[in-house]
């Protein structure tokens, strides 16, 4: 029997470690992600300033999570397409039409 079963706490900790490394990578390498984090911070500050309700906080947090998740997913797709299709290929440039890249 394996020590690291699917629900073992050590396996969960490793999963969170990888997730935080991914967020750190996005912060370092993705300008759009940094801008969206800044906008999120401003919105949170305004939320405290205007003392928004719990339900408004819920909507705000859900919106932030969706925005940042979509940005990371978009970056992942861009990197995958860059891996599959060389930059010199004319087919590689069609991805920019739907991914809004460079």
Image (cartoon, rainbow, N blue to C red):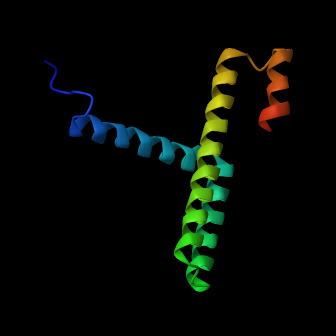
- Residue at 60% x, 64% y: name it: 59
- Residue at 56% x, 78% y: name it: 53
Percent coordinates x, y for residue 22 in the rendering: 48, 41
Going by the image, does 96 lie left or right of 77? right
- Residue 64 visible? The answer is yes
Answer above or below: position of 46 versus 67: below
Answer above or below: position of 28 versus 54: above
Going by the image, does 16 lie left or right of 62? left
- Give the quarter of the figure containing the N terminus: top left
Percent coordinates x, y for residue 88 in the rendering: 81, 17
Residue 85's quadrant in the figure? Answer: top right
- Residue at 59% x, 85% y: name it: 49
68 or 92: nearer the viewer:
68
Answer above or below: position of 64 versus 51: above
Going by the image, does 6 lie left or right of 20? left
- Residue 102 visible? The answer is no
Residue 100's quadrant in the figure? Answer: top right
94 or 86: nearer the viewer:
94
25 or 70: nearer the viewer:
70
Percent coordinates x, y for residue 66 in the rendering: 61, 50
- Residue at 66% x, 29% y: name it: 77
28 or 50: nearer the viewer:
50
Percent coordinates x, y for residue 83 in the rendering: 64, 19
């Amino acid at each position: 029997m394996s020590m690291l079963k699917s629900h073992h706490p050590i396996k969960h900790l490793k999963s969170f470690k990888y997730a935080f490394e991914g967020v750190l990578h996005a912060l370092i390498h993705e300008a759009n992600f940094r801008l969206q984090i800044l906008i999120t911070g401003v919105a949170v500050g305004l939320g405290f300033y205007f003392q928004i309700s719990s339900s408004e906080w819920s909507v705000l947090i859900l919106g932030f999570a969706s925005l940042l998740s979509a940005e990371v997913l978009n970056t992942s797709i861009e990197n995958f397409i860059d891996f599959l299709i060389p930059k010199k290929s004319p087919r590689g440039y069609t991805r920019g039409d739907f991914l809004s890249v460079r």
